[in-house]
Structure formats: structure tokens, C-alpha cells
């Protein structure tokens, strides 16, 4: 049963800019532990009753529905979506589900050189129970039984966890979900199972021509550059190349304690309930996540400089595809455009190159 506790003081931040056509209500808050949360109230339909109690005698199970990794949209240095969560829909499709996501400002670029794939491994391990909910896969089982889905992904500098569920079960789900970051068990007994899960993901992803091409590009960065990291991880990097399980266990806990700090986390939650209720649930769950106030790792020394592009990168490579495909890919090294996310200048170039109308580059090439 979800139990409410006294709310702590929060700082209300600037409300996001939105379209006139957007009827959702927004509120951005920062908790005392430093976590920033975006609350989204969607009044498009009346909210269902907030009966947060779950049926008695529920049992957690380890049965999971896994999907193969999607080849499209793979990041060149991303462990991509893990699909260790549920993906079931059906009788609840007519109901708009509530959703919650938590993003942490750390990813595979922070892997230690001797344990590559550690960030991805930790992402898996925190899902394996908490002190408050110690049963493995208890959260996943709860989400599945309530017609929702959950998942996570590890990228270069961020790790994201998320779920959706019927709205009346959102408070309970948020309580279980938040405990992964308050007091995860990350037991040694679960390590081998999660290493095998990661090995399975790697086996599914490795025949992908897109992933193989991206791994080739990774190898062209200079020695010591975080982009050279083997971000997926597999049994070799997480077992064979490590002296013993104790080393991996200690490294995983050290990684979590160093990087999984509340002040480096952002949360977004959306439901049809009012903003004050969402704020209460966020404060009473994510407000318990500890913070160490340590700065994130500084990768500024690896910022793009034209002179740092290696001769290996300025080359042509012929790759024998796994699938039946023939393509030419041109890749440029560019400076970061994250600060220009509002205007996205690179997308103008992409649009011009991709335009297929009269007078376009495509029409010219086809004529030739």
C-alpha cells in the first residue's frame, strides 16, 4: 500500500514554454535533494478514481516479455533500449495510461577502462529489487499485471528508466520505482543472470549492420577517448576479463553511489490528475533519493576540434553487410549542437539534402 508522508519544501522553477494548442498543465519543481521534476497534468479526459490499493495476495514473477533490439535509431555509442521490461497491451488500450520517467546524467562514457559496459550493467542491476521491495522482478510483475510496460536504456552520457500504467496504480508504481534509486539491493546473486541478459542483448544487436557500422566508427576515435568505449558490455567484458565476481560487485556499487545522485536526476510524470497530487507523489517518493552533490565527469577535453580528427576517420571503409543492403554513408565529426536544441541548425541541412521535390538535389542526381 502506498503511504503518504509529509511533503518537504520544493522550489518552483520556470514553467515550460508550450504551444497554444497544448491543453496540458505543467509545473517544474526542484526537491530539497536536488532532483528536478516536470509535472504534467493532462485534462483531456476526466481522471479515473485514484484507488491505489492493489489486490491482496499478488505474487511477483520473473516472467518477462523481451523484444529484439530495434535496428532503427540506434545511437552509435548507446547500449540502446534494453527491453528487460514488459511490453504488453490489450484490454487497457482504450484507457490513456499514466507515465513516469527518470533520467540520470551518467552513461557509458563513464565506464572504467577495465570494466566496459559497467553503466549498462548497473542499469540492469538496480531493477533487481530494493530494500523495501526485495523480490526480484516485483516491479516488473506489478506493472505487467496492471496492463502497463516498463523499460530502460543506457546512452553515452545519460541513463533513462521509464514506465506506464493505469492511472489508479500510478502512486504505488512510483513508490516501487523510486526505491530502485533510494536503496537498490544489487545483490551478488543477481549478477550472473543480468550478465547473461546483457549477453543476450548483445547477441541480438551484433548482427545489425547499423550497430556494426557504429562500432567501426567508435574504433576510429583516439586512444583514451570515451567514444571508444564498448558500451554494450557482454560476458567477456563483464566476466571473462575480470578477476572475480567480487570486483564487479564492488565496482557496480561504487558506480551507483558515485553517479546515481538525486541532484543529477530529472523526473517527468504525466497523468490526468491535478498538479498538486502529482507533486505530492513525486515529493513522497523521489524526495527520498540520496544526493552526494559530487560534480559529473568533465568531458570538455574531448570537445570537437578540427585538428583532433584522426587520419583513420578521414578514410573510406568497405563493410560487408549481414543483410541484403547496399548503401553509402558519409559521416562528419561536428561540434556539439546540444546548446542549439531550440533552432536545430543541422536539421535545415538534413531537410535540404532529403528534399525530393522539383529542383532538389535528389531530382538532380536521378536525372544524372
Image: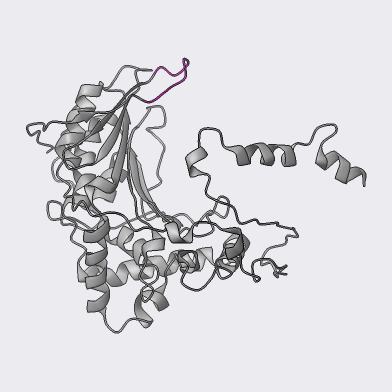
Residue 257 shows in this picture: yes
* Location of residue 198 in the rendering, given as x and y in whole percent from the top left corner: 40, 66
Residue 208 in view (yes/no): no
Helix, strand or loop for the magenta stretch, by majority? loop
Q: Which residue occupies the foreground of this view, 89 or 133?
A: 133
Q: Which quadrant, please, contains the N terminus?
A: top left
Q: Nearer the viewer, residue 84 or 340?
A: 340
Q: Residue furthest right?
A: 368
Instruction: Tell me where the magenta segment starts and ends, as one range.
Output: 16-23
Q: Is residue 141 above or below residue 360?
A: below
Residue at the spot x=35%, y=22% of the render? 42
Spot the residue most to the front: 307
- Is 18 included in the stretch rendered in magenta? yes
- Give the left or right position of residue 49, taking residue 213 as reference: left
Query: Quadrant location of residue 356?
Result: top right
State the image quarter where residue 99 is shown.
Answer: top left
- Is residue 48 shown above or below 114? above
Residue at point 47% right, 58% down? 78
Q: Position of residue 252 (x, y in %)?
A: 26, 67
- Residue 39 image position (x, y, % from top left): 29, 29
Considering every residue shown, the one lying at the far left of the view is 6
At which x and y percent is residue 349? 68, 40
**Residue 26, picture quadrant:** top left
- Image: 321 above or below 42: below
Image color mode: one colour
Q: How many marks?
A: 0
* Residue 324 lies in the magenta-colored region: no
Amino acid at each position: 500500500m502506498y503511504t503518504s508522508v509529509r511533503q518537504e519544501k520544493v522550489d518552483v522553477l520556470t514553467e515550460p514554454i508550450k504551444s497554444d494548442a497544448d491543453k496540458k498543465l505543467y509545473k517544474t519543481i526542484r526537491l530539497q535533494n536536488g532532483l528536478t521534476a516536470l509535472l504534467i497534468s493532462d485534462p483531456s479526459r476526466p481522471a479515473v478514481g485514484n484507488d491505489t490499493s492493489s489486490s491482496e495476495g499478488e505474487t511477483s514473477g520473473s516472467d518477462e516479455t523481451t523484444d529484439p533490439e530495434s535496428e532503427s535509431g540506434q545511437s552509435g555509442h548507446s547500449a540502446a533500449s534494453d527491453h528487460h521490461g514488459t511490453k504488453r497491451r490489450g484490454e487497457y488500450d482504450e484507457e490513456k495510461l499514466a507515465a513516469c520517467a527518470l533520467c540520470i546524467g551518467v552513461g557509458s562514457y563513464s565506464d572504467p577502462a577495465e570494466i566496459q559496459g559497467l553503466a549498462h550493467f548497473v542499469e540492469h542491476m538496480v531493477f533487481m529489487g530494493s530494500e523495501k521491495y526485495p523480490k526480484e522482478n516485483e516491479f516488473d510483475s506489478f506493472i505487467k499485471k496492471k496492463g502497463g510496460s516498463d523499460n530502460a536504456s543506457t546512452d553515452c552520457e545519460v541513463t533513462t528508466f521509464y514506465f506506464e500504467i493505469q492511472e489508479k496504480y500510478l502512486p504505488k508504481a512510483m513508490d516501487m520505482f523510486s526505491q530502485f534509486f533510494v536503496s537498490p539491493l544489487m545483490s551478488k546473486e543477481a549478477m550472473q543472470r543480468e550478465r547473461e541478459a546483457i549477453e543476450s542483448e548483445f547477441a541480438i544487436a551484433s548482427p545489425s549492420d547499423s550497430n556494426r557500422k557504429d562500432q567501426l566508427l567508435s574504433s576510429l576515435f583516439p586512444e583514451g577517448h570515451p567514444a571508444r568505449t564498448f558500451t554494450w558490455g557482454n560476458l567477456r567484458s563483464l566476466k571473462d576479463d575480470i578477476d572475480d565476481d567480487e570486483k564487479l560487485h564492488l565496482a557496480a556499487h561504487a558506480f551507483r553511489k558515485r553517479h546515481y545522485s538525486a541532484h543529477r536526476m530529472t523526473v517527468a510524470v504525466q497523468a490526468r490528475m491535478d498538479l498538486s497530487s502529482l507533486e505530492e507523489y513525486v515529493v513522497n517518493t523521489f524526495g527520498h533519493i540520496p544526493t552526494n552533490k559530487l560534480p559529473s565527469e568533465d568531458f570538455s577535453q574531448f570537445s570537437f576540434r578540427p585538428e583532433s580528427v584522426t587520419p583513420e576517420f578521414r578514410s573510406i571503409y568497405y563493410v560487408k553487410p549481414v543483410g541484403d543492403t547496399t548503401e553509402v554513408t558519409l559521416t562528419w565529426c561536428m561540434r556539439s549542437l546540444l546548446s542549439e536544441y531550440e533552432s536545430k541548425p543541422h536539421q535545415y541541412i538534413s531537410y535540404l539534402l532529403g528534399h525530393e521535390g522539383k529542383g532538389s538535389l535528389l531530382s538532380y542526381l536521378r536525372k544524372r
